Amino acid sequence: MSNTVHVIDVDSGNLQSLLNAITSLGFNVKFITHGDDPALKTCEKLILPGVGNFGHFVKEIHNRNFLNPLKEYINSGKPIMGICVGLQTLFNGSDESNNINGLSILPGKLSKFNSSTKSVPQIGWNSISLNFSNNNNNNSNSLFGISEDKFYYFVHSYAAIRSKSEIDSLINQGWDLATCTYLDETFIASVSKDNIFATQFHPEKSGIAGLKVIKSFLINNKYSKINLNNKNLLNLNSNNIEKTSTGLTRRIVACLDVRSNDQGDLVVTKGDQYDVREKSTENNVRNLGKPVEMAEKYYKQGADEVTFLNITSFRNSPIKDLPMLEVLRLAAKTCFVPLTVGGGIKDFIDPDGTKYSALNVASMYFKAGADKISIGSDAVRTAEEYYLNNCKGLGNSPIETISAAYGVQAVVISIDPKRFYINDPSNCNYKTIKTSNLGPNNEEYCYYKVTSQGGRKIHDLGAVELAIACENLGAGEILLNCIDKDGSNSGYDFELINMVKSNVSIPVIASSGAGNPQHFVDVFKNTKTDAALGAGMFHRGDYKVSDVKEFMAKNGLLVRIDDT
Ligand code: 1PR
């Protein structure tokens, strides 16, 4: 059996992670970028991965002359595996890009999740149900070991949403299926028939459980015996564990604030209310460890996601940011969960006069292995522009250009809000709330102004207003910090989280204030946050990510525990 797998590359999103995953399993990858490549006729195994926009992906398949060679490959009976938009392309088409035809190997179209009932995109770890056709080999799972007792990482707004009878009809046509239910909508998470296999989720980002699926495909291990009693003890099989309404697990994000220290080394640091210097006379930047090593440690402890924030990027040129690219490259080789990078994602001109667009910068990070980029300061500038322009984007902002190229799921907005108190909310320009923590002069109301440049500049813009503008411009997720809570170990700011969450339909990651596992339980029980982030408590070694997850599970919350 050849050790090489061929992967179709039409410049659609981050293929570096897939390459890293396959390489970590001891296989080689050869990319095929054009349908005329003779390797398409001779290769033994093909992967069709896709990220982002359906229309863009399918057009590239056409433009690069892949259509007929791809059909010939599939008809030859040799194995092919589609991932994410690669699975979507097997259908007739998608509401995301009308008038663009898919391969029509499977019937019907993709449609958008209903965002009036839940966060869209679906971002996170969900479980699947297996549905087998009658011609399946003696009650064997032909889905390369995909299992009902595992969680897989999904990130998408469009899906093959199907009714029970439509699913039965596919099964009658000989398809083995994994379906997934996202709150009120059931969609196709994986398909298998003859030589065709595809997943809507990203196995290369689904931890060890996902790597096992890729490995099974690479070694032709299509069938595995069904063992439905083998459920994850901590989770799906336990009566004490909640069933979340969306099906998603409670997502835990480990965050690394990174900067150069006074010796010029790139270090993980952590501040109190954004002040990252020691309180000693030396006043050094706190050095809590090396970014790549710490990221790997958190991945192994079970973090569902790792975020890197380059916290001093606003002072530097992109050339000085290059070490962060290296951090991403190295971390992506060992961390098979989503990676986000923030800091300095904006248009700028280098000291030598070279112009870079934010899209150029983001592309460099995606190529290095990032799955999402996070925009802080420039999102504030863009939102101010949006309101000055009668709530319309100019079309050229980083949020708009990056989400158009890589999909909304790839653009996170990092908000750095600061709390202000008032007595009378009637004349306030920002969304206010009646607070349960009275202000210093017993004020009963509060609001949050956003800041930029690491909290240094306070803007006349509210946190909710910023979040709404960014969602409208094409952001896919909010990373909601809170300067007042940062590094305080006193728990999250529920009032802020509830206020922002109830005004947007994209997912929100709660951040700032986590000091112990109880704080994670509290934030999920008291708010509708989609994820919770911790930094200092992990870096200091007070608790491991696994301590948090075990505590959450003991308190009945659904968390992902990876395979070993
Ligand atoms: O503005 O696009 O260049 O992005 C800069 C990014 O760096 C922003 O995301 C901004 O939040 C972040 N940043 C800038 N300065 C600081 C600083 O600390 N001096 N860190 C900073 C923000 C906030 C969190 C932190 C949580 C949890 N750090 O991500 O990890 O508050 O901490 P805790 O669990 O220990 O309480 P741009």
Image (cartoon, rainbow, N blue to C red):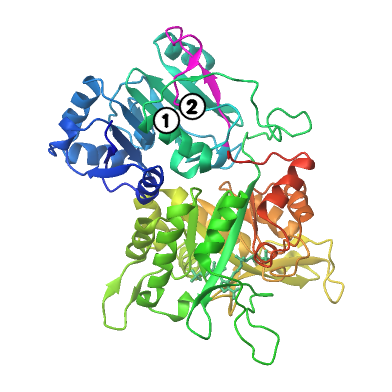
- Asked if the residue under mark 2 is in contact with the one under mark 1, i.e. CB atoms within 8 Å, the reply is yes
| Quarter of the picture holding the N terminus | top left
The x, y position of residue 313, in whole percent, is 46, 75
**516 to 230, vertically: above or below:** below
The residue at 41%/71% (across/down) is 323
Left or right, 224 with respect to 430, comes to: left
Q: Quadrant of ligand 1?
A: bottom right
Magenta segment's dominant SS is loop
Helix or strand or loop: what does disc 2 sit on?
Answer: loop
**416 to 147, vertically: above or below:** below
Quarter of image, res 496:
bottom right
Identify the amino acid type marked 1. Answer: Ser
The x, y position of residue 372, in whole percent, is 46, 54
User: Is residue 369 found inside the magenta-colored segment of the image?
Assistant: no
The x, y position of residue 104, in whole percent, is 30, 22
Whole-number angstrom distance, CA of label 1 to CA of label 2: 7 Å
Please tell me which residue lies in front, 171 or 428: 171
Pointer 2: what residue?
A: 145
Identify the amino acid type marked 2. Answer: Gly
Please tell me which residue lies in front, 15 or 144: 144
The residue at 26%/76% (across/down) is 354
- Which disc number belongs to residue 352? none
Magenta span covers which residues? 126-145
For mark 1, does the 10 Å Cα neighbourhood hold few (<14), some (14 to 19), or many (20 or more) residues? some
**312 to 513, vertically: above or below:** below
| Quarter of the picture holding the C terminus | top right
User: Is residue 142 found inside the magenta-colored segment of the image?
Assistant: yes
The residue at 24%/30% (across/down) is 44
The x, y position of residue 17, in whole percent, is 40, 49
- Which disc number belongs to residue 216? 1
